[in-house]
Amino acid sequence: MSAMIELGSISKTYKLYSKPLDRLKEALSLSKKKYHHDFNALNNISLSVMKGEALGILGKNGSGKSTLLKLITGVLSPSSGSLKVNGKISAILELGAGFNPEYTGRENIYLNGLMMGYSREQINERMSAIIDFADIGDFIEQPVKVYSSGMFARLAFAVSINVDPDILIVDEALAVGDIRFQTKCIDKMKELKAKGTTILFVSHATEQVKRFCNRAVWLKDGQLVADGEASEVVDLYEDYMKYDTFLKDEGLSSPIAEAPEVGFEIPENCDLLASVQNVTLNKGNFKTFDALEVDVVYDIYEEKIDDFLIGVAIYTPDREYIFGPNTYLEKVQVPRQRGRHVVKYIIPKLYLLGGTYCIDVGAFNNEGLVCLNYKQEAARFTVTNNYFSEGLVYMEHRWEVQR
């Protein structure tokens, strides 16, 4: 499969001036004094997009998404790095961009077609399909300055996806359309994708990215921080937007703390009976149905605590309680005498769906009524999946068709 877009260490830097006069001062300065500061809209982005891929591009406003698309379409030139695009691009970057407000819809179809390199005869061959797709009735013969934003969207989309592009770029254009129009556009985009068209899809509607795209990238402050299966990257991005969590490591994993060396001593002037020393997980990034293992290292300072127990709880980052067993309720005998001990808590099949989760660990006595020591958010982990379900947890189920 051939690469349609190849970016090698692309960067784009803008010069920002505090006031307009500073630009002139800098241009006329004999001493070459700088009156600007540099803003890196994109910083060292390397990316290859293959033929037939549907690539979702995620990121907050100002993360560099639009700059990236403008570089790919040739509207902007990179400050450094290499860029190669193979094939004809059809792009919807801003609704109505490239439209002459005084021209009719039909005249603007010819204008946009000519701008994309098509002859009038070639546009005539596609004219009926474009007008049918836009479905704006008699307004096709009216100046586009009287169009609503929805009509702009319909006409812009109709032109862009009915000219057989090799690469289709869609930047938030679906947001203004009604449900029927969105359905029509997605159906057409699926058709193009099946024919081998490469699609770059920018949308704040992350569920659309998860469902439509097979791959996604996440831009943060001009840097590429995640690239992978669309559903997995969406899960990470949504967690970041909701909880401001950001886990950057090789692949999509979070770092795991090293277990402490085994060694036990009673602290001076210690008024604790026991303490949780360390909590580690078998890994940082999971799939639903993976095994989760939590190693809990704890110290007991009394000669013996007869009713000692350990509890492990799972929470969301905003402290929604999901599940929390303890050794007393489950009649598990753990070491209770003085010294350092390690117990392993195992969930053989993790039924959590995509998201970030926290592990709390506590040491208790008296059937859990007295807390001896508690570690809140002692560890964190993420769950990412290929898209197969929605919600917080997976539940065994079946469907039955009744009629």
Image (cartoon, helix red, strand yellow):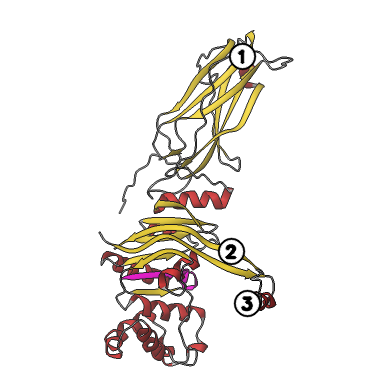
Describe the element under mark 1 as helix, strand or loop.
Answer: strand
> Residue 233 at x, y = what percent?
44, 51
Residue, far right: 269
Q: Residue at x 53, y 39 (%)?
A: 357
Circle nearer the N terminus (1, 2): 2
Of badges 3 and 2, nearer the viewer stands 3
* Inter-mark Cα distance, 3 to 2: 19 Å
Looking at the rendered structure, which numbered label has been put on residue 27? 3
Tell me where residue 51 sits by quadrant. Answer: bottom left
Residue beneath disc 2 = 39
> Residue 303 at x, y = what percent?
63, 6
Residue beneath disc 1 = 300
Tell me where residue 36 sits by quadrant. Answer: bottom right
Q: Is residue 330 left or right of residue 275?
A: left
Tell me where residue 270 sits by quadrant. Answer: top right
Asked if residue 103 is positioned above or below residue 205 in the image, the reply reads: below
Q: Residue at x 62, y 69 (%)?
A: 16
What crowding class fits label 2: few (fewer than 14 Cα within 10 Å), some (14-19), or many (20 or more)?
few
